[in-house]
Amino acid sequence: MHFSNIYKTGKALMASILLLLVVLMPALQITGAQSVGVCYGRNGNNLPAEGEVVDLYKSNGIGRMRIYEPNDATLQALRGSNIELTVTILNNELQALNDAAAATAWVQKNVQPYSADVKFKYIAVGNEVRPGAAEVGFLLPAIQNIHSAIVAANLQGQIKVSTAIDTTLVTNAYPPSDGVYTDPANQFIKPVIDFLVSNGAPLLVNVYPYFSYNDNPGSIDLAYALFTSQGVVVPDGTRYPSLFDALLDAQYAALEKAGAPNVEIVVSESGWPSEGGNQATPDNAATFYKNLIKHVTSTTGTPKRPGKAIETYLFAMFDENLKEGNADEKHFGIFTPDKQPKYQLTFG
């Protein structure tokens, strides 16, 4: 072939490849592997419609969502979006789901009708169940029944069933390698962990350096909580670059002591409020979110689990003016209710 023809053919091929990349780029951006997730709470009377919220996820390249109850309008809007979804079952529903028929009905109503084109990833059965709570005895049977219903629907290859805990179930967290479940927590979480091991499911953990810092501001440097310090060398000689990593590794240490060294942790919530509490300012929140995203989307990992990204969900998409609890609970949003970004963040 004449050189000029080869040149023209090469240019045409290159143009075709570039065009294909342009067409595929939006789809490539909305993939969980390249993005942090964001929790979508709906405890507000001024929030956008569900379809607008899903569009906001898509336009910002947010590839993962966690919701706190199955909601038809949200699930309909997610169809075909390629956004990976975690659905939470709240604690007040656990007792009813100890009935296997009720668990089957829950899956048939809230998962199966959407599963062809909604990317369900996890079902979090219970959120932050703690020792002494009425739900403790209902947690494992509810998890088992929901899992059985997912298997019956032939969706076990797509959806993992787990629970979301907070970091208070672990004690002796300094140094992180000494982390262990408290005796009351171990009684109910160990059987859950055994279930996760058997089914290859991760443990979901809500990790909040903000609350840990405020529990002990005299001993924890604010910069350490915001990922802006030079790090801390803990008593066993390990250097921790951030409080987030230390909290996460204490959870991994507890899993190891519970006989589950290979269970992965998904950080199912992490955030910093912009007002309403000590060091809850827009500047601190912006710093935390930017540095958290940079850290968890890199392959730095933690000292215990180096070399890989950390699946993480920011809390939360919006400020929620009906959220109960302390004033800061209402101000974790990364967007205002009118869909304006509170901080300049890139999500992948």
Image: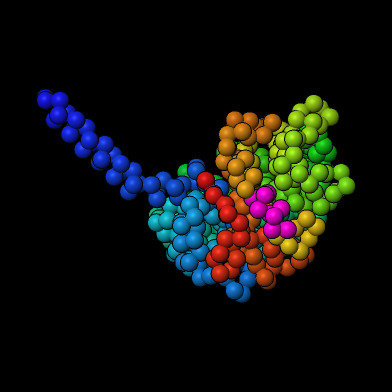
- The location of residue 324, given as percent across then percent down, is 73, 68
Name the quarter where the N terminus is drawn: top left
Q: Which residue is at the front of the view, 127 or 331?
A: 331
- The location of residue 97, given as percent across then percent down, is 62, 59
Residue 295 shows in this picture = yes
Q: Which residue is at the front of the view, 26 or 67?
A: 26
- The location of residue 181, given as percent across then percent down, is 78, 41
- The location of residue 302, given as percent across then percent down, is 67, 34
Judge whether residue 196 is colored magenta: no
Q: Which residue is at the front of the view, 44 or 277?
A: 277
How many numbered badges does the structure rendering display? 0
Q: Residue furthest left?
A: 1
User: Which residue sits at x=26%, y=36%?
Assistant: 14
Residue 166 shows in this picture = no
Segment tinted magenta in the rendering = 281-289
User: Which residue sits at x=65%, y=67%?
Assistant: 320
**Among the 4 quarters of the image, the one containing residue 329:** bottom right
User: Which residue sits at x=50%, y=46%?
Assistant: 32
Q: Which residue is at the front of the view, 190 or 19?
A: 19
- In the visual, does 71 lie left or right of 279? left
Q: What is the magenta segment's predominant secondary structure?
A: helix
